[in-house]
Amino acid sequence: MAYKQRGLFDPVSSEPMVLSRTKVDLFVQCPRCFYLDRRLGISRPQLPGFSLNNAVDTLLKKEFDGHRAKGSTHPLMKAYGIDAVPYNHERLEEWRESLAHGVKYLDEETNLLIRGGVDDVWINRNGELHVVDYKATSKNGHVSIEGEYQKGYKRQVEIYQWLFRQNGFKVSDTAYFVYCNGRADKEAFDGKLEFDIDVISYKGDTSWIPGTLRRIKDTLAGNSIPEASPDCEYCAYRAKAEKVEGR
């Protein structure tokens, strides 16, 4: 486990607590893991980076940025009947930088500064923004966002929708996932990986966010470690290991 020294919640400080959208999602997954991470500095074990996914993200951004510069509609958007164009805004690169900048908002009620880095933003003819997220995988059959794991994807775009609204933008409830599925049915690799690409629409609901932020603040301000989520694999592993070790 990693032990952190910076960015932890200080109950006596008046400075805003910075939380990435991934930390908000961590709280939803398991308040205990969140408390250990943001209050005590003990994070979950780090997973390896997904370099192939990052490469897909980078190439998709370049492709959509070409249409952004021309103010044109990408062929995928035409194919799915999406009446929009990539949003050309001077702060787009800042919004994409999740670590340095991202889309930010200070919730004054909780003194939590929420931020997150968005993949893309499209704008329709009504002046509404569509949050867009790129995903890459390799599986048999068509991809979808209806699995248990994809619940986190939905919360992700909902947080982005909420952040843009708090910054004064007109935001559509409809977000889009540009989902790239690597094909394994080819006869040979030949030095290239081919993808099927789907654009999946999703109607977001951000009503859960304000209440969640209040619960996050109450949890951080408390001096007791919360109960583990019943389906948290990390906490289940810790509990079983401690029982075997006789602690």
Image: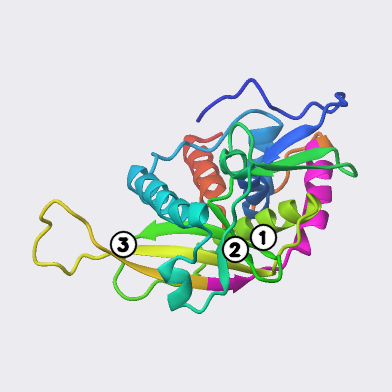
Circles 2 and 1, Cβ within 8 Å, touching? The answer is yes
**SS for callout 1:** helix
Which of the 4 quarters of the picture holds residue 209? bottom right
What's drawn in magenta, residue-wise? 201-220
Q: Is residue 121 left or right of residue 17?
A: left
The image's mark for residue 138 is: 3
Please indicate, yes or no, whether residue 146 appears anywhere in the rendered image.
no
Q: Determine contact: label 3, label 2, CB under 8 Å.
A: no
Give the alpha-carbon distance from disc 3 to disc 2, as whole Å. 20 Å
Calculate the distance from the C-alpha at mark 3 to the C-alpha at mark 1: 25 Å
Q: Amino acid at mark 2?
A: Lys
Closer to the camera in the image, 157 or 90: 90
Asked if the magenta segment contains residue 219, the reply would be yes
- Give 11 or 163, whichever is nearer the viewer: 163
* Residue drawn at x 66%, y 71% as measured from the top left: 125
In the image, 62 versus 179, the foreground residue is 62
Residue at x-position 35% and y-position 42%:
51
How crowded pointer 3 is (Cα within 10 Å; few <14, some 14-19, many 20+) is rated as some
